[in-house]
Amino acid sequence: MGFDVDVDFVKAEEASGGNSMNIIGFIKGELKRIMGTNMFALGVLVVDGLAALPARVGRRREEKEFRTCVVAAPGNGNIGDQALLETCLDRAGEGKVAVVMGSHDSLAIPERYMPNVSVFENRDLIYSLGWRRLIAIVGFARLSVRSDRVWVIGADTMDGAYNRLASISRFSLARIASVLGADSRILGFSWNGSAVDSSVLAARRVEKRVQLWVRDPISLTRIHADGVERAQLCADIVFARTSPAQVDGSIKEWMDSQVKDGRRVAVVNASGLIAEQFDQVGEYKKVLDYLLTSGWSVVLLPHVSRPGNDDIEELTRLCSEVSSDRIIKVDRLLEPDQVLGVVRDASVVVTGRMHLAVLSILGGTYPITIATQGKVEGLYESLRLPELCIEPEGGCGGRIVEVLLELDRNSVLSGMIPGADVEELRGRAELAFA
């Protein structure tokens, strides 16, 4: 028997009535508890390893077809995940690349990479248990044997905070690839201050075989404190991207017209994920009111759009509270290169999404970020600007306004982030690929 244990696997059942919802809630809670245990993690690692054994026996007869195999982040309407994948493709160099993703439409392969990239669709590899998972593991093992190196994109998916099975799965895949002779590493991930036990055990089990690259100093301190001693420091791998910025014509034209009229432009994002924690629209209204009364113009820019976690919906709610001809709302997700082009031409960015902050820094523009899951603090420690990291809570809008005022008083917004700081982050990100 096989079954899917993705975190959303019972949503369709929740409309069936009170008693059913109580039962479903209990089952979900028990599954989450079990998947957080050391025994569960150990079981997944052992069973996956056994399923990969046939590929190990026959590996010497396999020819290396791929220089690089990339296990992608989830995607599905997340520009940060798209940017992570494109960075890996930028850094893959010569040779064929295999990309493992949940579905063929979960992430895009830009045309510039197409000649050398093969996509392997395999959702069961990360989110399933039972026979479907075993079949998926066998296929991944065969792919690993045909690859010189395997890169698992870590990002914010390794500490169990979002999906416990998915975290263990990624550790397990990296270990399988190493056992089968590939240079295996997990690239640029955060580690929060309360990592799930099953993720900690998985990290300890694989660290002798797999390179673990943590993307900020605070995460490194945390994972070392959890006993994962061989983890190394890099930076978010998006800092290592080489693709140039692109211009979205309509947004560029509007921004240029505002600058021509003597206004500065702020890019503002409101995270649909943070909206699940508290009603942030009132806080963002304070920020927009301040910007508009201070002579700014504003681009409302979504970064993630998926059911239940939709920046476009959140920005639409915000627009219903604040109306001005000096606000333009982008109603679609841009490509990472286009995002880089927009933030490069702005004077400041306010965002609830980490990778929008990363792209802003790459573009030389200071971002103020509302933090989630303990994954942003370390980025700002690297920039020596901890005040730009804002907690998602009541009053955060006023705090953002205070930070904007302080940045203005110190003439920070009149210039770009020092190139040396950006290059330091780029250099650290490149370590993960060396």
Image (cartoon, rainbow, N blue to C red):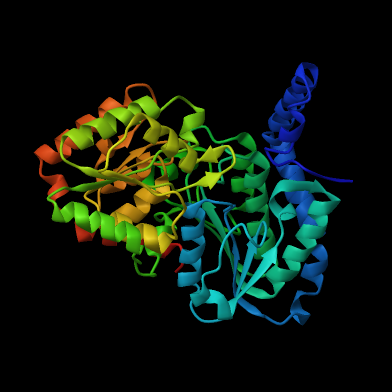
Q: Residue at x 28, y 28 (%)?
A: 286
Task: Tell me the quarter of the picture where residue 97 sits.
Answer: bottom right
The residue nearer to you, when weighing 205 against 253, is 253
The answer to whether 184 is drawn above or below residue 111 in the figure is above
Tell me if residue 89 can be seen: yes
Question: Going by the image, does 417 lie left or right of 280?
Answer: left
Q: Residue at x 69, y 75 (%)?
A: 146
Task: Point out the image quarter for the C terminus.
Answer: bottom left
The residue nearer to you, when weighing 325 against 119, is 325
Q: Residue at x 42, y 44 (%)?
A: 353
Where does the image place residue 186, in percent across and percent down from the top left? 55, 57
Q: Residue at x 67, y 80 (%)?
A: 64
Q: Residue furthest front?
A: 325
Tell me if residue 363 can be seen: no
Question: Going by the image, does 6 lie left or right of 160?
Answer: right
Task: Tell me the quarter of the picture where residue 11 sits.
Answer: top right
The residue nearer to you, when weighing 301 against 50, is 301
The residue nearer to you, when weighing 208 against 272, is 272
Question: Going by the image, does 393 lie left or right of 180?
Answer: left
Q: Residue furthest top?
A: 19
Where does the image place residue 102, in percent across and percent down from the top left? 67, 56
Q: How many numbered marks does the figure carry?
A: 0
Where does the image place residue 298, in percent across and percent down from the top left? 27, 44
The answer to whether 393 is drawn above or below residue 100 in the figure is above
Where does the image place residue 165, in percent across and percent down from the top left? 68, 43
The answer to whether 377 is drawn above or below residue 106 in the figure is above
